[in-house]
Amino acid sequence: MSHCHDEHHDHHGHDHGEHDHSDDITPALQFSLYQHIDFDGVVTMNEAEDGSGKAVLKKTWAERMAPEPEVASDADEQLLINIPFTGQIKLHSILLRTSPSESAPKTLKVIINRDDIDFSAAEELPGTQTFDLVQTSDIQEHPVKRAKFNMVRRLSLFFPDNFSDGDEDVTRISYIGFKGEWMPVGRAPTNILYEAAANPADHKLKGTGVNQVGGGIGGRGPGM
């Protein structure tokens, strides 16, 4: 359940000493890449529940604090999510929500513009940038080195471990979002200023632990 349930009462919040959530929402939506994720092409490897990786990506910014849906790893603690975009993007940052528990991912390796990333490739390649994550239920925003992410068409997010040091086989993530600029072919970068509700309706092919969706992730409005 979103902690921003009172965001429609911003104009009254100052009289009661409440936090004005418009400060949280407006900057996030200005650079949200939500609308430009190619949900049909999202593939999650080693997810315990078919379509859960895609469902997490379909969460809008307003839904970021909701505990469900979440993606949990299956055979071991590793997760790999391949995410194509509908055009070329300039990535600014990656946003995550995990938990304070040992199931929170500890490391994120990001690889760009490869359509052949499986676990072997993810482990062997150096990656475009690697992040040390933290155990928290707050939203983590990890700015990227923008010079390396100026011409992105696809992101591979590899979570190789969690905070259990091998004692916990399940890694859990409840929100993934992106900030940046989208560049349709032949045009200047653009960003998003509105948001639509997510419409979780997807399924995945599971055989090698890979999930391939066949339907659009609904709600193609930008909502992180």
Image (cartoon, grey):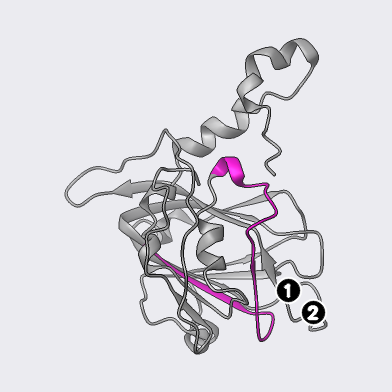
Other residues around mark 2 within 10 Å, as few (<14) / some (14–19) / many (≥20): some
> Could you say where residue 196 lies in the image, as x and y percent from the top left?
45, 40
Quadrant including the N terminus? top right
Residue range highlighted in magenta = 61-84
The image quadrant of residue 104 is bottom right
Secondary structure category for the residue under label 2: loop
In this rendering, the answer to whether 174 lies above or below 80 is: above
Task: Inspect the image, locate mark 2, and give the three-letter code of the amino acid beneath it.
Answer: Glu
Looking at the picture, which amino acid does disc 1 mark?
A: Asn
Badge 1 or badge 2: first in the primary sequence: 1
Tell whether 141 sits left or right of 185.
Answer: right
Q: Name the residue under label 2.
A: 168
Q: Label 1 vs label 2: CA separation?
A: 8 Å
Which quadrant of the structure image shows residue 103?
bottom right
Q: What residue lies at 47% left-to-right and 51% top-to-bottom?
A: 199
Question: Which dot, 1 or 2, sits closer to the camera?
Answer: 2
Q: Which residue is drawn at 57% across and 67% down?
A: 52
Residue farthest along the left direction in this orientation: 186
In the rendered structure, does residue 181 fall within the stretch colored magenta? no
Give how far across and how far down residue 223 sits, in percent: 48, 43
Q: Do the residues labelled 1 and 2 touch (CB within 8 Å)?
A: yes
The dot on residue 162 is: 1
Q: Which residue is drawn at 81% across and 76% down?
A: 164
At x 79% / y 79%, what residue is drawn?
A: 168
